[in-house]
Image (tube, rainbow, N blue to C red):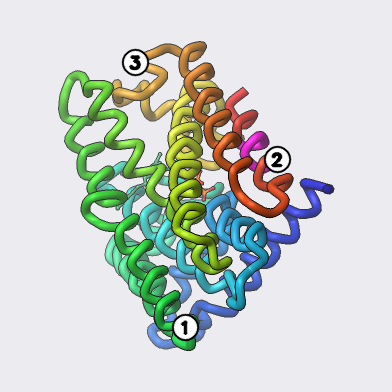
Amino acid sequence: MDFAAELKRHVASVAHGLDLHLPPATTRPTRLHTAMRYSLEAGGKRLRPVLVLATAELFGHGSSDPLPAAVAIECVHTYSLIHDDLPCMDNDDLRRGRPTAHKQFDEATALLAGDALLTHAFGLLAERYAAQPALAHALIRELADAAGSRRLVGGQMEDLLAEKKADATPDELEFIHLNKTAAMIEAALVLGGLVGGADPRHLATLRRAGRHLGLAFQIIDDILDATADTATLGKTAGKDAQADKTTFVKLYGIEASHRIAAEHTAAALGAFRELPGDPTFLHALVQNMAVRGK
Ligand code: GRG
């Protein structure tokens, strides 16, 4: 398998899907639809939608197209980035190598673009999987759980609360990362599995893989924030240390953080081995992710 070519194929599908499944920028109000596309089309690694497509392929696709589910999760992820960058949250100027949405447009437009992307995701799932109501229901429920107050939004809330304290505990840090980061990665694998027709046992395995993958991803993100530069990251580097934020790096140091990330990566790879189909691409993707922080 040519990993780079496979990744390119999936990323190109995502680009095509985003264009196909989002209202054109010329839709009224054009400022809003332009802002939605501005943040989505800025790129990013497309990790979550690629996980949806690759996981669906692992199970042989079932009878449905995984692309709308891939687009839906990228819409939710992008909304969370737009809102996270707002002055009332992380107050950042740079995202995906471009000015953040509120810098490029204004705060109100950025807020509304995020709101609209979040809502669009669920509309897309309801509409595109309408012919299979049980699948549509399962996809909507999975994404709603992952993006809701107990997971993504809850993780963000605890993250903001933790910033106001001198020290967050390891338990608080784990809650934040399991929900702010791992929930959406877990959901990407589960959405792919659902579209592919995975049985409950395999869905549970995907969930476990996603949890480990999400934690590994976040630890590596913490390491990169401490070690890489802004140009490489496409977002402001060194923000955690500047804010004296509790991160894996602050709690355990760089070396132990690498070790913990490697343990989670190995656990995710182990879980993938329990699944049917050819996991070569998913393995390579996870390994590729793991070396980001090195
Ligand atoms: C506002 C509800 C709400 C949630 C915000 C996404 C987020 C939660 C915060 C951003 C800060 C952060 C470090 C989040 C952890 C998850 C993470 C590393 C997101 C960035 O994901 P990447 O690196 O981004 O996959 P790209 O741009 O490549 O898609």
The residue where tag 3 is placed is: 251
Q: Nearer the viewer, mark 3 or mark 2?
A: 2
Q: Are marks 3 and 1 in contact (CB under 8 Å)?
A: no
Vertical arrangement, residue 233 with respect to residue 144, above or below: above
Q: Amino acid at mark 2?
A: Ala
Mark sitting earlier along the chain (2/1): 1
Q: Quadrant of residue 156?
A: top left
Q: Which residues are magenta?
A: 284-289
The residue where tag 1 is placed is: 132
In the displayed structure image, the side of residue 64 where residue 184 appears, left or right: left
Query: Is residue 237 found inside the magenta-colored segment of the image?
Result: no
Rendering coords of residue 151 (x, y %)? 28, 49
Q: Are marks 3 and 2 in contact (CB under 8 Å)?
A: no
| Label 2 SS | helix
Vertical arrangement, residue 126 with respect to residue 220, above or below: below
- As measured in the structure, the alpha-carbon distance from the residue carrying label 3 to the one carrying label 2 is 29 Å
Q: Is the residue marked by circle 3 packed among few (<14), some (14-19), or many (20+) residues within 10 Å?
A: some
Instruction: Look at 57% across and 50% down and name the residue there.
Output: 47
In the displayed structure image, the side of residue 236 where residue 65 appears, left or right: right
Query: Is residue 285 found inside the magenta-colored segment of the image?
Result: yes
Residue 284 image label: 2
In the displayed structure image, the side of residue 155 where residue 120 appears, left or right: right
Rendering coords of residue 136 (x, y %)? 42, 77
For the C terminus, give its image quadrant: top right
Mark sitting earlier along the chain (3/1): 1
Q: Is the residue marked by circle 1 packed among few (<14), some (14-19), or many (20+) residues within 10 Å?
A: few
Instruction: Look at 76% across and 54% down and name the residue there.
Output: 6
Our reading of the magenta stretch's main secondary structure is helix
> Which residue occupies the foreground of this view, 102 or 176?
176
Q: Amino acid at mark 3?
A: Leu
